[in-house]
Image (cartoon, helix red, strand yellow):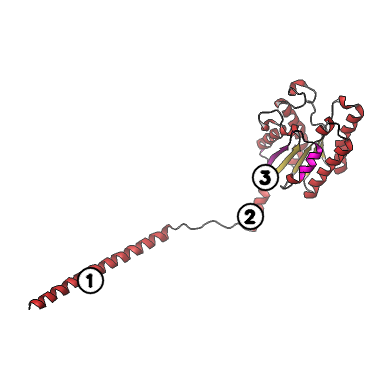
C-alpha cells in the first residue's frame, strides 16, 4: 500500500512537472512569435525609387554649366589675398546675383605662357566646358617670344577645345604691350588676337586691361597686376562679351 502511494505521488509529481514544462514551452513559443512579429514590423522598407532614363537625362540637363577661365597671373589673381577678388571670382558673383546656372572655374597660372597653356590644355579638357575664356599671350610678349610661336600656340589651344567639343563657346581676351617692347613688335602682337578671333569665329574682348593698364591707382606696386578695384573693371570688360552668351 505504501509503495502504491509512493508511485501515485511520483506520478502526480511527474505530471505536475510535465504541465509546468509544457506551460514554459507555450510561453517561450509565444515570446518567440511576438519577437518575430516585432522584428518584421520594424524592418525598414526600401522606398528609394530607381530613376528612369528620362529622369536621368533631366538631371543631366539641369546640371550646372561650366565657364573656364584659362589664363596667366591676371586670371589667377596674383598679389591678391583672396582669389575670389580676381575677375573670374567677380564674374561668379555677378552670375550668382542673376541666378544663372553657371559655375566659374579659375584655371589661371601665374607666369603662364602660351606654350605652357598648350601643354596643359588636354588636362583641363577632361571636363565638359560650355564657355572657354582664353587669356594668354601677355607673358610671351613681355619675354619677347617670337610672335609666330605665340600665334601658333594660341591656335593649338583653340583647336584642342573645339576638337573636344565643337559646341563650346570660346572668348579670346585681347592683349596689348607697353611701347618699350618696340613699335613693330607691339603692333603685330596686338593684331594676333582679333585675327585669330576672326579666323576661328570666336568672341573677342578687344583689350582685357582697358581702363586699367598703365593707371597706377588701379595696379599693384609692380605696375602690372591689377588691384581689387582694377580687377572689378577687368570683370566688367569680360562681362560685356560674356553676359549675352549666358542669356541666349
Q: Residue at x 70, y 44 (%)?
A: 65
Quadrant in which the N terminus appears: bottom left
Quadrant in which the C terminus appears: top right
**Mark positioned earlier in the residue sequence (2 or 1):** 1
Residue 229 figure quarter: top right
Residue 113 painted magenta = yes
Disc 2 to disc 1, C-alpha distance: 65 Å
Q: Secondary structure at mark 1?
A: helix
| Neighbour tally class for label 2: few under 14, some 14-19, many 20 plus, Cα within 10 Å | few
Q: Nearest the camera: 80 or 2?
A: 2
Q: Nearest the camera: 100 or 86?
A: 86
Which is closer to the viewer, label 2 or label 1? Answer: 1
Tell me residue 182's x, y (percent).
90, 27
In the image, the segment drawn in magenta is 98-121
Tell me residue 222's x, y (percent).
76, 24
Q: Is residue 216 visible?
A: yes
Give the labeled residue for mark 3: 64
Give the labeled residue for mark 2: 55
Q: Secondary structure at mark 3?
A: loop
Contact (Cβ within 8 Å) of mark 2 with mark 1: no
Q: Residue at x 91, y 27 (%)?
A: 183
Disc 3 to disc 1, C-alpha distance: 75 Å
Q: Secondary structure at mark 2?
A: helix
Tell me residue 240's x, y (percent).
77, 34
**Mark positioned earlier in the residue sequence (3 or 1):** 1
Give the labeled residue for mark 1: 18
Residue 101 painted magenta = yes
Amino acid at each position: 500500500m505504501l509503495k502504491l502511494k509512493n508511485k501515485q505521488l511520483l506520478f502526480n509529481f511527474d505530471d505536475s512537472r510535465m504541465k509546468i514544462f509544457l506551460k514554459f514551452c507555450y510561453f517561450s513559443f509565444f515570446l518567440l512569435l511576438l519577437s518575430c512579429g516585432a522584428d518584421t514590423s520594424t524592418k525598414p522598407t526600401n522606398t528609394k525609387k530607381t530613376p528612369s532614363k528620362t529622369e536621368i537625362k533631366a538631371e543631366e540637363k539641369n546640371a550646372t554649366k561650366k565657364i573656364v577661365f584659362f589664363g596667366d597671373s591676371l586670371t589667377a589673381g596674383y598679389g591678391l589675398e583672396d582669389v575670389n577678388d580676381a575677375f573670374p571670382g567677380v564674374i561668379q558673383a555677378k552670375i550668382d546675383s542673376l541666378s544663372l546656372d553657371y559655375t566659374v572655374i579659375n584655371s589661371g597660372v601665374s607666369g603662364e605662357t602660351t606654350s605652357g597653356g598648350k601643354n596643359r590644355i588636354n588636362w583641363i579638357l577632361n571636363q565638359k566646358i560650355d564657355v572657354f575664356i582664353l587669356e594668354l599671350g601677355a607673358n610671351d610678349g613681355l619675354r619677347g617670344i617670337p610672335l609666330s610661336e605665340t600665334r601658333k600656340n594660341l591656335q593649338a589651344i583653340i583647336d584642342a577645345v573645339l576638337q573636344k567639343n565643337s559646341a563650346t563657346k570660346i572668348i579670346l581676351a585681347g592683349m596689348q604691350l607697353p611701347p618699350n617692347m618696340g613699335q613693330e613688335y607691339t603692333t603685330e602682337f596686338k593684331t594676333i588676337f582679333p585675327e585669330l578671333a576672326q579666323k576661328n569665329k570666336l568672341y573677342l574682348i578687344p583689350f582685357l586691361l582697358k581702363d586699367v593698364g598703365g593707371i597706377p591707382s588701379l595696379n599693384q606696386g609692380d605696375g602690372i597686376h591689377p588691384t581689387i578695384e582694377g580687377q572689378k573693371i577687368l570683370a566688367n570688360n569680360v562681362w560685356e562679351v560674356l553676359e549675352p552668351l549666358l542669356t541666349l
